[in-house]
Amino acid sequence: MLLDGLVGLGLLLGGIRLMAAALTRALAGPAGRVLERLDRRPWLAALGGLAATALIQSSSVTTLVICGLADARLLGLKAAAGAVMGANVGTTLTAFLTALDPLRAAPWLAAGGAAGLLLSALPAFRRRLPGAAALSAAALGLGAALAGLRAVEAAARPLAGRPGWYDHLRAVNDRPLAGLAAGLVLTTVLDSSSAAIAVLQRLVQGGLITPAGAVPMLMGANIGTTTATVAASAALGHRGRRTALVHVTFNLVGTAVWWPFTGLLAALVSAAPAAAAGLAHAHLAFNAAAALLQLPLAGLHLRAAAWVFPERRRG
């Protein structure tokens, strides 16, 4: 059972990373060019960040691109802050994809992706459809991720009856702060908020965690996704670091604002026909509302970031 769960988790992580890498290879160039043209337009930049992340399926990649553009002065800091906030909304699409029924979707996606890769080996096919190989790899990655989710769900279900695991799960269900910390740690360890939320979807779907217990974990996953960006920004200058810090403060403020209304998000999860889809709805509501609220306050985020990372004068 444990081995099956670990294999499933490996498939999930590998599939999501394959999908993100393939889509990045196919679409990162056009997405980067769009973001470059959004200097000093935070609202349009937010839409650009949203679209780029929805296409690439990795908010970490999009955010690092934004940090790099800001550090190179190809993107204004206000536009960069807006793009980061939009990227948080765009990444919610992944939760809707991982909410699909693995038994129905995984075989078709994997088979279609594999067939596309085989056809892409033919020079004539590759010339006619140059992006087919990357998109086929993305489909194969998503199929593998969904198959991994199925294995994780099957391995986790028997744990509900074990006293030790029941105590741990009850602590998450009954103590929101414990759930917040669990979501943060899980995302940091997996290095993917998409993978962490996908696992959480299966735990809720299987009844191991209640919707009320899942919402704080969802918030923790949103905070945890910033750790990779912050670590990578250490190699950048003060502009790139400020942009990365906006990613952190955006999610912290969003969590603080939503914290009194966790019951509302839990109700959204419960109202959906399937708990996995309901969690995707809650993820979208959390990030969309946070972006709408905080985009007009992008200047405050940047002032706080400037205080933490002041410009070093040469002299």
Image: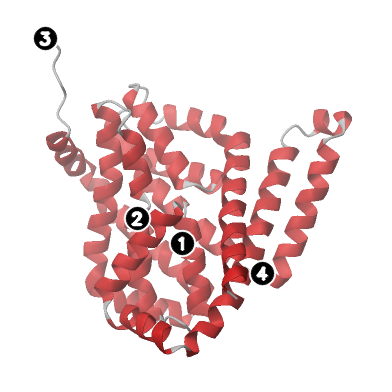
Q: Which mark is residue 196?
A: 1
Q: Do the residues labelled 2 and 1 touch (CB within 8 Å)?
A: yes
Q: Can residue 92 be seen in this view?
A: no
Q: What residue type is labelled 2?
A: Gly
Q: Do the residues labelled 2 and 4 touch (CB within 8 Å)?
A: no
The residue tagged 3 is 315
Where is residue 86? Give x, y as percent.
39, 47
Is residue 58 rendered to the left or right of residue 214? right
Among the two numbered marks 4 and 1 on one chain, the one whose residue lies closer to the N terminus:
4
How has the structure been colored for display?
secondary structure
Calculate the distance from the C-alpha at mark 4 to the C-alpha at mark 1. 17 Å
Vertical comparison of 106 with 123: above or below = below
Where is residue 308? Give x, y as percent.
15, 37
The residue tagged 4 is 102
The residue at the point 19 percent across, 38 percent down is 305
Q: Which numbered mark, 4 or 1, is in the foreground of this view? A: 1
Among the two numbered marks 3 and 2 on one chain, the one whose residue lies closer to the N terminus:
2
Where is residue 135? Give x, y as percent.
69, 43
Q: Are marks 3 and 1 in contact (CB under 8 Å)?
A: no
Question: Is 220 in front, or is 127?
Answer: 220
